[in-house]
Amino acid sequence: MKTLVFCAGAKDPNLSVLQQISSDLLIGVDRGASTLVAHGYTPDYAIGDFDSSEPPEQCRHVIRLPTDKDDTDLEVALLSVCERVGEENISQIIIVGALGAGRLDHLLTNIWLAHQPRFVPYLHKIRMVEANSITRFFGAGEHVWLHEADKKYVSFIGLTPIKKLSIKGVKYPVEAKDYPSPVALVSNECLGSMIRFSLEEGILCVVQSND
Amino acid sequence: MKTLVFCAGAKDPNLSVLQQISSDLLIGVDRGASTLVAHGYTPDYAIGDFDSSEPPEQCRHVIRLPTDKDDTDLEVALLSVCERVGEENISQIIIVGALGAGRLDHLLTNIWLAHQPRFVPYLHKIRMVEANSITRFFGAGEHVWLHEADKKYVSFIGLTPIKKLSIKGVKYPVEAKDYPSPVALVSNECLGSMIRFSLEEGILCVVQSND
């Protein structure tokens, strides 16, 4: 089961996560490829339009995209690598540097991946990791997510209207509540080692974070 | 016509905007009150739970909120000040430090203001200003927004499905297109001094930004 790590083009991504996981494929997205190399990593792929920096020579494969395109570099990179590997072979897709300090519109675009039907098969496997947050996406169903010991807060952010949201194992539990507009339930706190929640309909973005 | 400026609790908000506008009311939200004072400003109001820092003595009025509450400090501050001033008397509401580097869930919560029916009357007056971006929200109708000369990019991010979106005055125009899922149309570029766009249904978050 392969773990894919994408380092997106943020200025200062939290690469310490790379020491804690064994990844089968390391992918540098545009400027992210140089960032990986600068920190001593050898990306399997460098993918991007490289309009502001050349891909480093150390990368095993380089996929150069056109500058004028409808999709972002990260979108194309995700799709092309996931198709090569095969959805069923992928256990986790870890993306670092997608939500960090940088352009707000890029940050939102990366969260908006969750709205795109073409990413639905991969959605529950994606973890967006930044220095002080881990973000995941959840559709209808019952979910359990391990509380990250160094993260005090857990926030539940509806990307759509949400039907029958229940949250357990937190300071402010929620019981089968409907939210007809997308809601941001922020700064809840984990009480134990597991966060349990369920929804009947909608897309939920859940963020474990600390200050 | 009053301009209200809210400095939210970001670590390093872009206060240079304060030199370019004449504001009638300057409000420091929680830690933002101290930030304003530290930069030589005297907030008319300091509003927050002040759980991590005391409100500075220099503020004209202090409104202390409970720590345990459903709303964020910024939400309560917005509502309470807007009610005192009266919706019809407010020309602009400028919020600095709401979308900057900090907690991702706080950033999303501040954008999610646009989903809350109670803020609908104020939505078209709100500008969220950061160092490299200005963000506004638009509902159904025809809109014109002046191109900020120092911002190269303009991104159109649907917070909901969008019906009949048209965008003119940009490098990649859009003509009466429906988006059944929330879409992020990012890194468009302004061609002239005005960005003209319209939608028939939905909520649009528009970001002018630079790298």
Image (spheres, coloured by chain):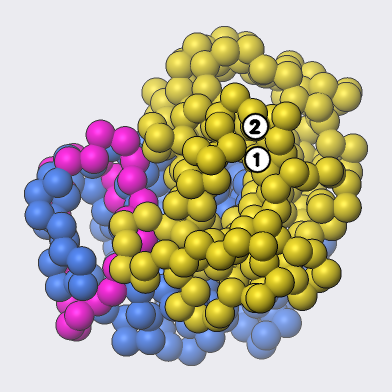
Chain colours: A blue, B yellow
**The residue stretch that appears in magenta:** A178-204
Residue A200's place in the image compared with A138, above or below, is: above
Residue sitting nearer the eye, B68 or B102: B68
The secondary element bearing badge 1 is classed as strand
Residue A141's place in the image compared with B41, above or below, is: above
Q: Do marks 2 and 1 share a chain?
A: yes
Q: Is residue A102 magenta?
A: no
Residue sitting nearer the eye, A171 or A55: A171
Residue sitting nearer the eye, A63 or A99: A99
- Disc 1: which residue: B93
The secondary element bearing badge 2 is classed as strand
Q: Quadrant of the N terminus of chain B?
A: top right
Q: Which residue is drawn at 88% across and 24% down?
A: B193
Q: What x and y, as percent, mark residue B174?
A: 64, 17
Q: Residue at x 50, y 38 (%)?
A: B83
- Disc 2: which residue: B90
Q: What x and y, as percent, mark residue B100?
A: 64, 61
Residue A8 visible in rendering: no
Q: Which of the 4 image quarters holds residue B51?
A: bottom left
Distance of label 2 from label 1 (alpha carbons): 7 Å
Mark 2: which amino acid? Ile
Q: Residue at x 75, y 25 (%)?
A: B145
Q: Are marks 2 and 1 in contact (CB under 8 Å)?
A: yes
Circle 1 residues within 10 Å: few <14, some 14–19, many ≥20:
many
Is residue B171 found left or right of A179 in the rendered image? Answer: right
Circle 2 residues within 10 Å: few <14, some 14–19, many ≥20:
some
